[in-house]
Image: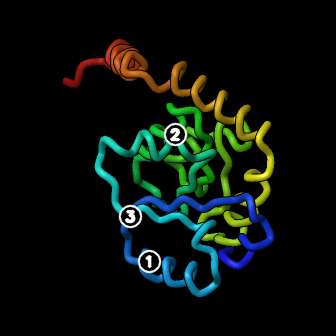
Amino acid sequence: MILELKNHPKLVLFLVGDGPRHQYIQELAIKHNLTEQIVMPGRLEHDEIPNAVAAMDFGIIPDSNDYGSPMKLFEFMAMGKGMIVPDYTPITEVVTDKYNSWLFQRKNKQHCVQLFFEIASDPELLKKVGENAIEYIETHRQWRHNAEQIIKLANNTSPIK
């Protein structure tokens, strides 16, 4: 993926965080003269995250698991940003592929990279998916929706004897 960035000089990979691959990616960027296209601010303070997300066109969750909460997905969607995400159950319960984000087959890094380059070059698609993401959050993922689900569950459950 990193070398393929050279074929797309207007694309910038904005990698937030200081995970175990940070130094390796930084060295690759330097080695291949891609420091203008790979921006790595490292770990950010919590109050800096909204500005970082606002600077992005979309996000990527490269991997997850079968039981994890897709909290980052909700945060990005609430800010009008679609995400490229693996097709684990907790995520597929939230994402309608190509509508409010994009799904790739989990553990299939090539499919993830392919989606990255496909959608990065389509600003209209990014805008529409971002709008759909906000609409989804507003109509399905507010605290009142949680309360409504709990009340509905309580009303449909008979007492335990």
Q: Give the residue drawn at x 59%, y 87%.
A: 31
Residue assigned mark 2: 54
Task: Examine the image and state in which quarter residue 100 appears.
Answer: top right
CB atoms at circles 2 and 3 under 8 Å apart? no
Residue 14, position in %: x, y? Answer: 54, 59
Residue identified by numbered label 1: 21
SS at badge 3: strand
Which mark is in front, 1 or 2?
2
Q: Is residue 156 visible?
A: no
Q: What residue do we see at 59% from left, 39% from top?
A: 81
Left of 8 or right of it: where is 44?
left
Residue furthest toward the left? 161
The image quadrant where one finds the N terminus is bottom right
Whichever of labels 1 and 2 marks the residue nearer the N terminus, that label is 1
Q: Which residue is mark 3?
A: 42
Vertical placement of residue 9 versus 80, above or below: below
- How far is the residue under mark 1 from the one under mark 3? 11 Å
- Reply above or below: 78 against 25: above
Count residues near mark 1 (Cα–Cα under 10 Å), then give few for <14, some for 14-19, many for 20+: few
| Quarter placement of the C terminus | top left
Q: Is residue 116 left or right of residue 79?
A: right
Taking 75 as reference, is 86 above or below it?
below
- Identify the disc placed on residue 33: none
Residue 10, position as x, y percentages in the image: 74, 58
